[in-house]
Image: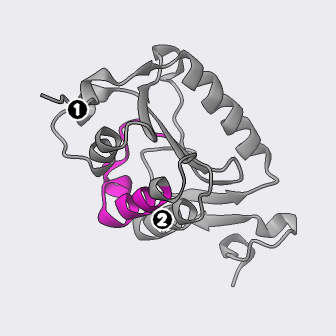
Amino acid sequence: MSEDSQTDTSKSPDKLRTLIGSLSQLKEETSDIFTSATQSIQIYSHGLDPRILNNRQIEKDILDFVKRSRKSKVQILIYNERFLRGIDHRLVTLAQRFTSFIEIRVVPKDFHENPFGFYLVDNRTMVYRSNVERYEAEKLVMPNFIIKDKSKLFHTIWQSSSPASFLRALHI
């Protein structure tokens, strides 16, 4: 096994990173980190990455996480809620059912130039895509400066974002 494809996440710096090279591996690693969540899941995504996040396993992982504790929190930042208008996305449906645990907000236009996306769990583990148009990614484990940097960025954007009102369920 080469250095770049190490999946051992022991404490040595070269093993705190796993390279991801395919869609199936990206789905698997995303499911893996969501399953390990104990406090929070933060998703920074241009359009909720339908090929990755809109599947039964990810839905189950997030549902299990939300049901595990009253303190569970899923925060999702997207660029444009209108993109999701014609899509029956599983995470949108979950957010509509579990409004106390899952919140979707819209990224302000000031931050739309960011080409990356990431899924951050408990501020400790992350799947990071430097270019959201590609499926190549990295799974990172603390300590890692990218996790610290993107966690701070997420919190900054979250504070200035607005609720995705279009995606709210209407209870009539």
* 44 lies left or right of 63: right
Quadrant showing the N terminus = bottom right
Q: How many marks?
A: 2
- Looking at the picture, the colour scheme in use is one colour
Q: Is residue 80 magenta?
A: no
* 163 lies left or right of 33: left
Q: Position of residue 160 (x, y in %)?
A: 55, 16
| Amino acid under disc 1 | Ala
Secondary structure mostly taken by the magenta-highlighted segment of the chain: helix
Quadrant showing the C terminus = top left
Q: Is residue 50 magenta?
A: yes
Residue 78 in view of the camera: no
Q: Residues within 10 Å of mark 1 (few under 14, many from 20)?
A: few
Q: Residues within 10 Å of mark 2 (few under 14, many from 20)?
A: some
| Rendered position, 149 above or below 9 | above
Q: Position of residue 114 (x, y in %)?
A: 54, 29
In the image, what residue occupies the spot 47% across and 53% down? 66
Q: Which residue is mark 2?
A: 31
Q: Which residue is mark 1?
A: 169
Instruction: Report which quarter residue 150 is drawn in.
Output: top right
The secondary structure type at the circle numbered 1 is loop
* Magenta part of the chain: 44-65
The secondary structure type at the circle numbered 2 is helix
In the image, what residue occupies the spot 66% across and 67% down? 18
In the image, what residue occupies the spot 25% across and 24% down? 166
Closer to the camera, 85 or 66?
A: 66
